[in-house]
């Protein structure tokens, strides 16, 4: 049995089956905002239209409301796994977003560097090369934002 992280203690096992569709959406939006930041989510929400509204609803419900709220992995671990998946798939825009989110979730820059080194071995050196450049850009932007008093 996997030990539950104290950060996830408020989420009982089997919680997915006991929640209404609206509760799943609301939990997803809460986690999405906590992980990605209000500014990012507000930008995404302001851009949705009849073409993208169903997709935004899908990711809020399933990615954020169903997967990210599950017990078993804390947000730091979920960020590590997500970064690896983004690098492996070459999803660079999403990777940048999740590098920033990983810092919000408590991963250090050193830990992110180690995750990227690990992906160099198990994904590819060229992908990790791109990811390291991206991490430099994200970290520089984070430093600028923090110096300007913006949220991480």
Image (cartoon, rainbow, N blue to C red):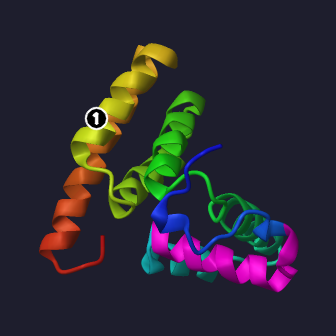
> Furthest residue to the front?
1
Residue 45: quarter of image: bottom right
Residue occupying image coordinates x 27% and y 47%: 137
Image location of residue 71, percent across then percent down: 63, 59
The x and y percentages for residue 36 are: 47, 67
- 23 and 88: which one is in front? 23
Which quarter of the figure is the N terminus placed in? top right
* Image position, residue 33 (x, y; %): 51, 76
Residue 26: in magenta span: yes
**31 to 82, vertically: above or below:** below
The span picked out in magenta is 17-35
Q: Say which quadrant the C terminus sits in.
A: bottom left
> In which image quadrant can residue 62 be found?
bottom right
Pick the residue in front: 60 or 93.
60
Residue identified by numbered label 1: 113
Establish if 58 lies above or below 100: below
- Magenta residues: mostly which secondary structure? helix
Residue in the foreground of this view, choosing between 88 and 49? 88
Q: Give percent across and percent down for residue 121.
A: 43, 14
Could you say whether the residue bearing mark 1 is in a helix, strand or loop?
helix
| Left or right of 96, for residue 18 | right
Q: Is residue 39 left or right of residue 85?
A: left
């Amino acid at each position: 049995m996997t030990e539950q992280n104290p950060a996830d203690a408020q989420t009982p096992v089997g919680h997915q089956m006991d929640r209404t569709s609206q509760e799943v959406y609301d939990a997803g939006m809460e986690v999405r905002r906590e992980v990605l930041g209000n500014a990012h989510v507000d930008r995404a929400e302001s851009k949705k239209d009849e073409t993208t509204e169903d997709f935004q609803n899908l990711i809020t419900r399933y990615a954020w409301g169903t997967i990210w709220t599950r017990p078993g992995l804390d947000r730091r671990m979920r960020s590590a796994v997500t970064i690896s998946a983004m690098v492996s798939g070459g999803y660079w825009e999403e990777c940048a977003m999740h590098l920033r989110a990983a810092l919000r979730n408590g991963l250090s820059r050193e830990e992110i560097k180690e995750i990227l080194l690990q992906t160099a071995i198990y994904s590819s050196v060229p992908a990790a090369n791109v990811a390291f450049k991206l991490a430099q850009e994200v970290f520089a932007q984070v430093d600028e934002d923090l110096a300007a008093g913006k949220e991480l």
